[in-house]
Image (tube, rainbow, N blue to C red):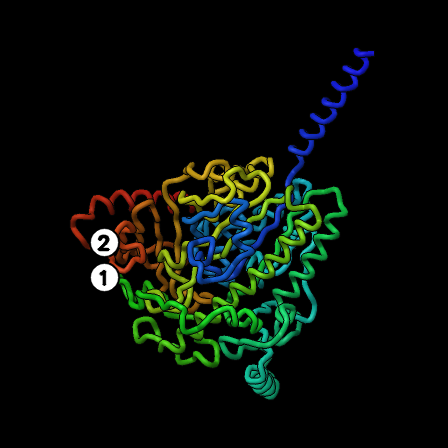
Amino acid sequence: MKKTILILVSFCFLIVGFTDNATEKKQPNVLFIPIDDLRPDFEAYGNEAIKTPNITRIANNGVTFTRAYCQQAVCNPSRASLLTGLRPDDLQVWDLQTSFRKNMPNVITIPQYFKQNGYTTIGFGKAFHNIFPDSLSWTKDVYIKNYPFDPDAMYFSKENLKIIASKKQKLIAENNQTRFDKYGIWYIKANATESAPVEDEAYYDGVQTTEAIRQLHELKAKDKPFFLSVGFYKPHLPFNAPKKYWDLYDRNKIQLSDNQYLPKGSPVFAVHGDQELRSYDDFKDLPKPTDATLSETRQRELLHGYYACVSYIDAQIGRLVDALEALGLAENTVIVLWGDHGWKLGEHNSWAKQSNYEIDTRVPLIVSGKGIKAKGQKSASLVEFVDVFPSLCELSSLPIPKNLAGKSFFPILQNSKNRTKDAAFSQFLLGRFPKKQISVDEKMGYAIRTDKYRYVEWYNWENDKRGKYLTNELFDHTKDPKENLNIAQNTNNQLIIKDLKTQLLGNFNNSR
């Protein structure tokens, strides 16, 4: 009898062991959260003035990368680079008008690779650049009807609706179809900010969150891992958000940038002047960074709007995380939250992205959930967006494709003190915004960021190739973290520049 009991107990332990191993080996789901124009400037990154409790929840369950960098500080190249694991020069995508499929039709994207490996992949909102949806990547790419392809410019205030109605009538009278999108819906901009007394679902990001939560319920019923991308449009311009998020902030207490001037000793072209903000009715007179500074009143309006939009998106993220937890999916889900590039809110006297400076190339990146041991920790290791693809593969126990330009930061997710690389690389093509223009002098800037320095070299760009060397920039982050003084011409720094130049050109020469 005792022997029988012992056998039964041993068998039970064996079954439990098999069950535990099966649970451990179960492939994790992925919740992918791209956020447009979100800079690393909120609670998880040390700025408690911007209220983001739900992103903080994600950060507390994962690793916050404090020195992550995009490969180009504008939407299309940055997203294409992250989602393919290749650099802009590899893809030959440097503007807003070139699909990465044009030059590399057979390249495999992150969601496409996961789909090939048994995942259900579903895309909401903006993952790739919105005008280039990628059907090969998704089991289902969700388009919510009755919204324009670029639904960030939605308005509800009387003033803005009046502006839109007037513009629409003028376009109709002129038989001008330029503001129709591919779905036959008008896309018209009005003012750059809006505080409207509406619910979250009045704006697109609230609507798509509701639809994404409905999708989570359907995915829960399937015994198959999923890759769900919910790409948020805010805080991209216009800074429109429900009034309750504006009410979180006292405009007069918002801190203004303390370096509203161009970096001393840098070329004037390096701070990009073609700022998108100028395309909105109330900022058509926006001065170039080289000409004048915005009044304090207008600065505070923009900052207030940006903060409100960040908090609005944080609330939508909270709804997603709540749904994951309520459905019992959270424990087996990896969350990857990222912003496609930085954004200048007055720094260097500018209100835009599109430069090679730290303020534009440094990005928020938080990886949380299943498989992360360094929970609630921050990493100061240099990482790049091209590292996301191999890292997600390793987290999901998938083979890492050999063609990728990045390196997995999986070791950092296990121990935040680990380091995976010594430098990050970015670039920016001036003179091509939003698309290639005839008779415009283009300049390509290549940048390397190490622990201590940012070094940039500028070249003429002709026929999509690097031409004549023009000038360079060097910033010492131990003394000048906001990059206000270019020290490249200091004779004492020439040996430093020689070493950085070798690394810089070695990286970019190998990428072509």
Secondary structure found at label 2: loop
Name the residue at the right extreme: 1
In the rendered view, tell whether residue 290 sits above or below residue 88. below
Which of these two is toward me, 366 or 351? 366
Horizontally, is 416 left or right of 84 in the view? left
How far apart in space, not on screen, are marks 2 and 1 (Cα)? 8 Å
Q: Which of marks 2 and 1 is nearer the N terminus?
A: 1
Horizontally, is 323 left or right of 505 in the view? right
> In the rendered structure, are the residues bearing label 2 and label 1 in contact, judged by CB atoms less than 8 Å apart?
yes
Which of these two is toward me, 397 or 209? 209
Q: Position of residue 241 (x, y in %)?
A: 56, 71
Residue 179 placement: quadrant: bottom right
The answer to whether one can see residue 102 in this image is no
Three-letter amino acid code of the residue under disc 1: Gly
In the rendered view, tell whether residue 178 sits above or below residue 366. below
Number of numbered discs visible in the structure rendering: 2
Q: Which mark is residue 488?
A: 2
Residue 22 placement: quadrant: top right
Q: Residue 48 carries which label?
A: none
Q: How crowded is mark 2: few (under 14 residues within 10 Å), some or many (20 or more)?
A: many
Residue shown at 33% from the left, 45% from the top: 451
Residue shown at 66% from the left, 45% from the top: 115
Q: Position of residue 352 (x, y in %)?
A: 42, 67
Name the residue at the left extreme: 491
Three-letter amino acid code of the residue under disc 2: Ala
Residue shown at 49% from the left, 57% from the top: 340
Which of these two is toward me, 164 or 419? 419
Q: Name the residue under label 1.
A: 265
Q: How crowded is mark 1: few (under 14 residues within 10 Å), some or many (20 or more)?
A: some
Q: Where is residue 364 in the image (x, y as percent from the top left)?
A: 47, 53
Secondary structure found at label 1: loop
